[in-house]
Amino acid sequence: MNIHAIRAIYRFEMARTFRTLMQSIASPVLSTSLYFVVFGAAIGSRMGAIGGVSYGAFIIPGLIMLSLLNESISNASFGIYMPKWAGTIYELLSAPVSYVEVVIGYVGAAATKSVILGLLILLTARFFVAYEIQHPFWMLAFLILTAVTFSLFGFIIGLWADDFQKLQVVPLMVITPLTFLGGSFYSISMLPPVWQKITLFNPVVYLVNGFRWSFYGQADVNVLVSAGATIGFLLICLGVVWWIFRTGWKLKS
Amino acid sequence: MSPLDATTSAPDAIVSVRGLSKHYKSGLRALNNVDLEIRRGEIFALLGPNGAGKTTLISIICGIVNGSEGSVHVDGHDIVRDYRAARGLIGLVPQELSTDAFETVWATVKFSRGLFGKAPNPVHLERILRDLSLWEKKDSKIMALSGGMKRRVLIAKALAHEPRVLFLDEPTAGVDVELRHDMWEMVRRLRESGVTIILTTHYIEEAEQMADRIGVINRGEIVLVEEKNTLMQKLGKKQLTLSLQSPLESVPEGLREWPLELSGDGQCLTYTFDTQGNDTGIAMLLRKLGELGIDFKDLHSSESSLEDIFVSLVRGGV
Ligand SMILES: Nc1ncnc2c1ncn2[C@@H]1O[C@H](COP(=O)(O)OP(=O)(O)O)[C@@H](O)[C@H]1O
Ligand SMILES: [Mg+2]
């Protein structure tokens, strides 16, 4: 194991975050705060509680997931896309590193940022709504698992993309709709029966509900199913990354 | 050029390339059955026109491009099966000026060392930066540096992990005189410390000045590999130029047995001869000129440069 390489990549990526602190941390925290003000405080006060949880508190796990997914994907995809774009990828390709080390470095850094961000949003939410966390350990576990999984997914997007447009198309056209329709702002039991079934094909539903269960002990889907679905997606992403590095797809001619 | 033994490599070979071919997806055959052995501790210059396959060859050895057929060993390590050991020995200064714009010089050099699996060593990095006159710039962002400075940064990155084999892909293209000078100083120092250096260049004088051996590549094939001195001797031609007292209309009949050329204004006679031959024919020529009453005010001889040799090789003239 080339520990020095993992450390070098990880540090490099973290340094990039701190250089762009406003963009990578402050702006997601701010936009999430706006959600709390609008949905939690203004509209939420007119909404009934869902399953005994006030609306403002109900949306917290979903909102954190929303930022977590977006930031994980954009951090990780940007992290590996940039060297490809700037041509500095030559160094990575010529270095005595295995794909496992590259992935640990890049995905580890992207996931770290996302977890920090998630915790910051959680803290910020305290200013707007009261909430409780019934299973803090599971809350953290879901946070980390989701951050890692979607950083890995973003990493794949970054490897696949060969222009800036492709880099943004998946987050914009796939992830944003899925997260908005994934039960961040509502319980799927509020949907018409047909849509309740269709929604179950949306992987984000499992993330949001697993996470919400760790807060309030209740969710639309079983927490084990949630965890299983997330881990399943993680394994798929790992398989894809392994294949990319083995074949050099989009990396080596 | 002696054909390489396909099974054993010379004991002093640090890089050995066997039967290497590369077809790009475009269908282009960039390398065609290349055999090449680089000796431990030498400076090897790879010469060839644009598009000959120099960068492709280097990229395959360094792991940036996949070869299609054949194998490469670096100090006995297969570059695919044993890539960690092979790559750890190699430093690469790429042809393109690809740098991380937002990083500082120090951070990027430190990153390179780590990436190649070496424990931090600020003393070593400081020495490299000082040698390359980069020390004052160590806290500057790379994007604030000039092109020449960026080239230095790339060299510093390549040396950060103390490689045993250094590839310089057209290191002096578009580089100022001062940097060229510094660079060759450094290359000599590295060679003294036992580092093997492989460089590609357009500037033939550089190969002439620096290299121990020269390889010529054209259209993906190694045309020749030779000690520089042998090459110069073997292929070198000398020219004797005579400035005449009074211009000639044409080369006189009596001088037909020498390959002479008369300049347009009839003022200069140029005689081209092989340095290989025992008898250069100069004495005879001068005697004959005297007999014919052709006086000259000056004479000088010049040796053909590698440039000439190279051009004739690439045109298939050997
Ligand atoms: N990634 C690539 N895809 C397709 N063709 C390439 C690629 N890289 C180089 N080539 C082609 O391969 C040939 C050799 O290129 P290169 O190795 O860069 O030559 P050199 O470095 O000697 O100038 C050229 O014809 C070039 O156009
Ligand atoms: Mg080239």
Image: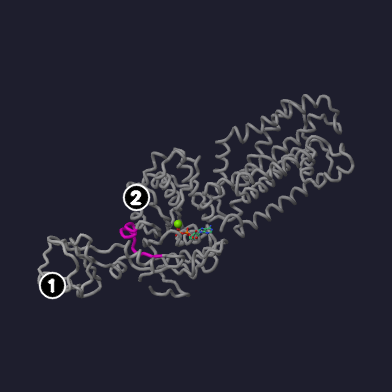
Please give the name of the residue rendered at 58% of the width and 34% of the height, measured from the top-left corner.
A21
In the image, residue B208 lies in the stretch drawn in magenta: yes
- Give the residue type at disc 1: Lys
Please give the name of the residue rendered at 27% of the width and 64% of the height, measured from the top-left corner.
B304
Please give the name of the residue rendered at 77% of the width and 49% of the height, measured from the top-left corner.
A229
**x%, y% of residue A53?**
83, 31
In the image, residue B151 lies in the stretch drawn in magenta: no
Q: Is residue A11 left or right of residue B172?
A: right
- Compared with residue B70, is residue B119 higher up or lower down, i.e. above or below? above
**x%, y% of residue B230?**
30, 69
What is the quadrant of the C terminus of chain A in the image?
Answer: bottom right
Residue pointed to by mark 2: B180
- Compared with residue B39, is residue A111 higher up or lower down, i.e. above or below? above
The disc at residue B288 is: 1
Q: Which residues are magenta?
A: B204-216
Q: CA distance from mark 1 to mark 2?
A: 47 Å
